[in-house]
Amino acid sequence: MAIHYCRLDEFWTKYQKFNFLIQKKNIGNLDWKLISPDSKQNWLTEGLHSEFDNFIAMGSKEGKADKTENVIFKIYSLGVSTNRDVWAYNFNQKILAENMQRTIDFYNLQVLKFKREFTLSRAQERELTDRFVENNDKNISWSYTLKTTLERQQEAIFSNQKIRTSLYRPFTKKYLYFDKMMNEAIYRFPQIFPTIEIEKENLIICIGGYGRKPFSILITNLIPNLNFYGDPQQSFPFYVYDEEGNNRQENITDWALENYQKHYNDLKITKRAIFYYVYGLLHAKNYREKYAQNLKKELPRIPFVKDFWTVSKIGEQLADLHLNYENAQLFDLESKINEPIDWKVDKMRLSKDKKTLVYNQSITFLNIPEKTFDYKLGNRSALEWVIDQYRIKTDERSGIINDPNQVDNKRYIIDLIRKIITVSIATVDLAEQLDNISFEQ
């Protein structure tokens, strides 16, 4: 099959493209290019590097089915999708509990009403359910899965034990109501973080960007959201467990360990060292730039480099920096103060030149280092993620308020700004040490 391809300026509007076609009058007047698909049936191959396919896959769909040869990680998972983030997440644990108790009570009333009024076939139920449910934005947000549990006449039970700390967006912690029924999909996370105690020992590498957004990577020991970087991300854990939190197993395959030890002729290489090697390598600028188009098509593949331990040790330093960002040093940032000092945030504003941050009416930060914005996760820098997320939001439909200001730690957000600047600059400096690594084909 022959593929004829005509490319126009990618920044043209659809009207510019329509006008172009009108002027050409006939497809025969277009400048067609004959292209051939590659082995993976990609027919737009510009910027793709064929050797990428020879690198080790981080994971695969087959790997999820426990066919774990030739991959680094046995399983991986999308982040948690609630389909009702306004209800299921909040900066305030008490308000989250109140919101979820209210929506669960309302849902259970719908179940009782459904039980009284209907005994129908599955096909009839779905058609009826869409008409039956009370779309009360003040009390509930319906989704496909929640309607399905209603049809099964399954009641929900509120429990404070289901409230977990989550990394909702990069460097943004919120409380999550983690529950199979009230979340649309929790994927493999009952195996990854089955209990709060597991957060003390397990780590996950969150990979995003394949598709629409730039490549992104961040490590965490908390449950991440599905759209962690604004788009779906995949999480690669170091450990997996049963749903009670027992039977801990390392998630890196024995095949990967044997392969790395054999390649480098080094029995000191461990699965933990490989985990950090992956984290370090995926911060390397030359890897991310060279294989940018490949990373838009699929999950990363990991090449060998000449110096395994340099990459692994830098990966470990990056992991420590990112996991413990709340303990980072406060960056010595110039500020302008208007008395009386107020620590409360409503909505921060960053200047167009990104040198000035208006924290609130009484505090403005000046001369933010340019290097701060070189540390990007998707389309935003780490600092811009914090600025975007740490603001008071009121959901118009439900009226739910999400306020990041902490009553018992009034300086948390203003200190977080200075800490994230420290973390960003340190990340860039560490990643620069990987600029000259060379890949083995």
Image (cartoon, helix red, strand yellow):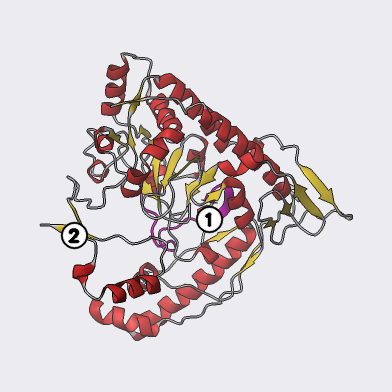
Crowding at label 2, few (<14), some or many (≥20) Cα neighbours within 10 Å?
few
- Residue at point 70% right, 50% down? 413
**Amino acid under disc 2:** His
Whether residue 120 is visible to the viewer of this picture, yes or no, is no
Q: Is residue 166 above or below residue 374?
A: below
- Residue at point 30% right, 76% down? 22
As drawn, is 172 to the left or to the right of 364? left
Q: Which one is nearer the viewer's eye here, 191 or 39? A: 39
Crowding at label 1, few (<14), some or many (≥20) Cα neighbours within 10 Å?
many
Q: Which one is nearer the viewer's eye here, 254 or 329? A: 329
Q: Is residue 237 above or below residue 109?
A: above
Q: Which one is nearer the viewer's eye here, 149 or 418? A: 418
Dot 2 falls on a residue whose secondary structure is strand
Q: How many marks?
A: 2
Q: Which residue is mark 2?
A: 4
Dot 1 falls on a residue whose secondary structure is strand
Q: What is the CA distance from the residue labelled 2 to the residue labelled 1?
A: 49 Å
Whether residue 130 is visible to the viewer of this picture, yes or no, is yes
Q: Which residue is mark 1?
A: 176
The segment highlighted magenta reads 167-188
